[in-house]
Amino acid sequence: MDTEKIWTQFNEQLYFFILKRVKNEVATGDIFQNTFLKIHKNIHRVREDQKIKAWVFQIARNEIANYFSNEAKYVNHLNNQEYSTTESTEAFCCFDEFINDLPSIYKETVELVYIQGKKQEEAAQLLSISLANIKARIRRSKAMLKEKFSECCKYDFDKNGNLIGEADCAKCS
């Protein structure tokens, strides 16, 4: 099979597969283009045509992971910058404070997974704990953060987990 046949057979399905995960059309276009570039460069490695679809979608998954990893690095860089005005720090509400107030085992887990963009398996290895333990810590961290956010800022969550309500917080107002 060649790149043109792969394009004809999978391009729409692959595009929407990426878009569904990334939820950003510009990023989807970049990831889609990188995916086909890698397909074209490595097509000679495929030995069985029956496995081509799995191979194509695995390349896309890897490109999506690379995208989110790079985004996490960018967000982490922004979080490490010092802000000179109180207006810019107020835009972040109380969330950074809530993360810093978490017990250290939960704080380091949140920082590894959500701020640094590490996979849960990688975070478990770095912390020398099991994957199940990482998942439990993440679940507990989210519960603590939701509780603090609800108490301080008077926000609540609907049945789908979406934020609802209006801020009634001296720090946020």
Image (cartoon, rainbow, N blue to C red):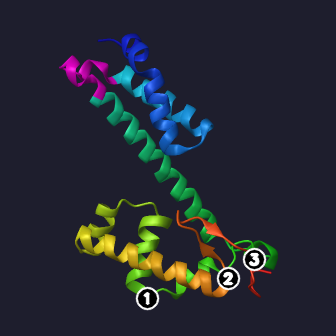
Residue ID at (48%, 83%): 144
| Spatial CA span between label 1 and label 2 | 22 Å
Compared across the picture, whether 2 is left or right of 14 comes to left
Distance CA(mark 2)–CA(mark 3): 16 Å
| Residue 67, percent from left and from top | 49, 46
- Residue 154 is marked as 2
- Quadrant (top left, top right, bottom left, bottom right) of the N terminus: top left
The residue carrying pointer 2 sits among few (fewer than 14), some (14 to 19) or many (20 or more) residues within 10 Å by Cα, namely: some
Q: Earlier in the sequence, mark 1 or mark 2?
A: 1
Q: Amino acid at mark 2?
A: Lys
Q: In this orientation, does residue 62 appear?
A: yes
Residue that carries the numbered disc 3 in the rendered image? 90
Picture coordinates of residue 93, whole percent (x, y): 69, 77
From which residue to which does the magenta span run? 42-53
* Occupied quadrant, residue 84: bottom right
Distance from label 3 to label 1 (Cα)? 23 Å
Q: Nearer the viewer, mark 1 or mark 2?
A: 2
Q: Residue 44 in magenta?
A: yes
Q: Of marks 2 and 3, which one's residue comes earlier in the chain?
A: 3
Give the numbered dot on residue 103.
Answer: 1
* Residue 151 pos. (x, y %): 61, 87
Residue 90 vs 18, above or below: the answer is: below
Instruction: Kindly state the secondary structure of the residue where label 2 is placed.
Output: loop
Q: Secondary structure at mark 3?
A: helix
Q: Using residue 103 as the reference point, say whether residue 99 is left or right of it.
A: right
Q: Residue at x 53, y 66 (%)?
A: 161
Q: Amino acid at mark 1?
A: Pro
